[in-house]
């Protein structure tokens, strides 16, 4: 489906969020394909019961963990990567042997209806159903009893999903968001750093990505150099008038556009713009916009930005960034740019985050050997590669005995002599 319907998928992603064709291919279609191929290649290995040690207490016996499907699972996905976030969990769910109901996001209606049309043509529609709809349809689905709910989206709805799940003791995976920090030390390759920050921010759906850099922390003395490097890279990527660039997604809806304008035009930060700021209400486009030294108590630093705005916070010493990050809720991803191995180690051991990258942004999600998910308020559970298979499986404990090896001491009548043997 992903191969034969590439053009239709690109059209839908363009209709939904103006996603550039390259991003549609690289970030959605090819990741879906590689996820399928990875599951097909590894499925036998993942399914294989895992032998574990048997204990003397049950001698003779063997012990293993056998994977079994959970049953019928619900996948609720989000609009920003509407193909990938819908199909990636579904791939693991069916690999693990479950039946699935997929509820794509109504905020990406073209991709939602394309999935509803295409999936029954390519997969067994007795075990994979697409239910389209918004709040009322999702609320109705959440009333039902599921064997697992896999939700991707904001944490407010995540809380509602978890509350509904408790009614039936249904386990959940919640793939949520948060404010992903980027710490930039001065001991770096500046040009590469600027390119990798820009690619992870504006090159991923124009900042509308859960692991997009949300804010930068650097030192007061290094901020001007970093800013100049970012400006240069942005001009090279998107030209003098980024609103005309075909390589930047638009903002998804007028509501989302207005929310971003409110953040930009907030009087606490509006005079802090040092690059960009252009907007086009008709086309729902906002240019890459950088802010310097925004107050920590501004709305921009309190909520997830999820768009093309990037504030830079400055500290006197780079180590101060750790305390600042740890004073906020745990992010889905945290990034550090430095050559200093001591700083790298400190970052890894001090900062709690769903995932982290040293010297890049966002690309960890392409490695299926790494679990992808949040911690604390950025989510619970993880997926990708084998982790998706595991998320949709139950690891059943199987102890296998014959009829020998009877220990009399185990059975009544109990006695102190028997207790000594046990
Ligand atoms: P969204 O608006 O598409 O909502 C997500 C899903 O929740 C949709 O299917 C929608 O129908 C459903 N929904 C919305 N309101 C609901 C309600 N009141 N009751 C029941 N269901 C409801 O997407 P969004 O929430 O705007 O997505 C953006 C957020 O998701 C950001 O916080 C982002 O960081 C996070 N996100 C996380 C990941 C991840 O993998 N961790 C990926 C993408 C987005």
Image (cartoon, grey):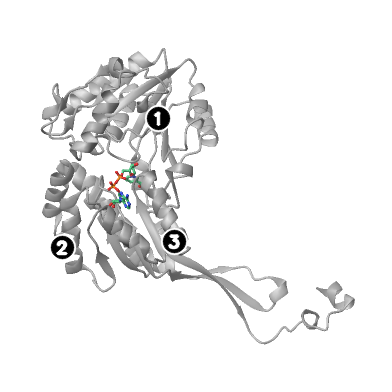
Give residue 190's position: percent from left, percent from top: 34, 22
Residue 233 seen in the current view: yes
Mark 3 or mark 1: whose residue is earlier in sequence = 1
Residue situated furthest bottom in the rendering: 403
Mark on residue 390? 3
Mark on residue 302? 1
Residue found at x 31% / y 31%: 196
Give residue 29's position: percent from left, percent from top: 22, 52
| Residue placed most toward the observer, 380 or 44 | 380
Quick one: label 1, few (<14), some, or many (20+) residues within 10 Å?
some
Question: For the C terminus, which image quadrant?
Answer: bottom right
CA–CA distance in space, label 3 to label 1: 34 Å
Q: Quadrant of residue 248?
A: top left
Residue found at x 37% / y 52%: 368
Quick one: label 2, few (<14), some, or many (20+) residues within 10 Å?
few
Q: How many numbered callouts?
A: 3
């Amino acid at each position: 489906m992903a191969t034969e319907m590439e053009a239709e998928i690109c059209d839908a992603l363009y209709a939904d969020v103006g996603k550039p064709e390259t991003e549609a291919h690289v970030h959605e279609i090819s990741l879906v394909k590689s996820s399928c191929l990875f599951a097909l290649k590894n499925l036998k290995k993942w399914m294989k019961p895992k032998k574990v040690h048997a204990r003397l207490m049950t001698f003779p016996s063997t012990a293993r963990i056998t994977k079994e499907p959970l049953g019928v699972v619900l996948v609720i996905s989000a609009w920003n990567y509407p193909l990938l976030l819908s199909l990636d969990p579904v791939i693991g769910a069916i690999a693990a042997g479950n039946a699935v109901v997929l509820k794509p996001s109504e905020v990406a209606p073209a991709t939602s209806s394309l999935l509803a049309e295409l999936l029954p043509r390519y997969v067994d529609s007795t075990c994979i159903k697409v239910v389209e709809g918004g709040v009322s349809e999702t609320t109705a689905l959440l009333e039902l009893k599921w064997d697992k709910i896999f939700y991707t989206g904001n944490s407010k709805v995540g809380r509602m999903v978890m509350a509904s799940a408790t009614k039936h003791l249904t386990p959940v995976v919640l793939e949520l968001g948060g404010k992903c920090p980027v710490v930039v030390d001065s001991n770096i390759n500046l040009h590469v750093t600027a390119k990798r920050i820009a690619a992870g921010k504006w090159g991923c759906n124009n900042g509308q990505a859960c692991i997009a850099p949300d804010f930068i922390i650097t030192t007061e003395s290094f901020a001007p150099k970093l800013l100049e490097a970012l400006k240069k890279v942005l001009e090279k990527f998107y030209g003098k008038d980024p609103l005309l660039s075909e390589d930047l997604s638009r903002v998804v809806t007028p509501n989302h556009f207005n929310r971003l304008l409110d953040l930009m035009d907030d009087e606490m930060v509006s005079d802090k713009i040092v690059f960009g700021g252009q907007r086009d209400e008709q086309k729902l486009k906002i240019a890459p916009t950088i802010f310097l030294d925004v107050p920590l108590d501004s709305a921009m630093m309190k909520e997830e930005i999820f768009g093309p705005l990037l504030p830079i916070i400055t500290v006197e010493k780079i180590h101060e960034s750790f305390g600042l990050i740890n004073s906020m809720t745990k992010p889905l991803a945290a990034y550090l740019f430095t050559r200093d191995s001591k700083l790298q180690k400190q970052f890894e051991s001090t900062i709690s985050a769903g995932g982290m990258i040293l010297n890049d942004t966002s690309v960890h999600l392409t490695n299926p050997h790494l679990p992808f998910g949040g911690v604390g308020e950025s989510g619970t559970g993880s997926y990708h590669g084998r982790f998706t298979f595991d998320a949709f499986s139950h690891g059943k404990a199987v102890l296998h005995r014959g009829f020998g090896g009877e220990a009399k001491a185990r059975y009544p009548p109990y006695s102190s002599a028997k207790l000594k043997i046990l």
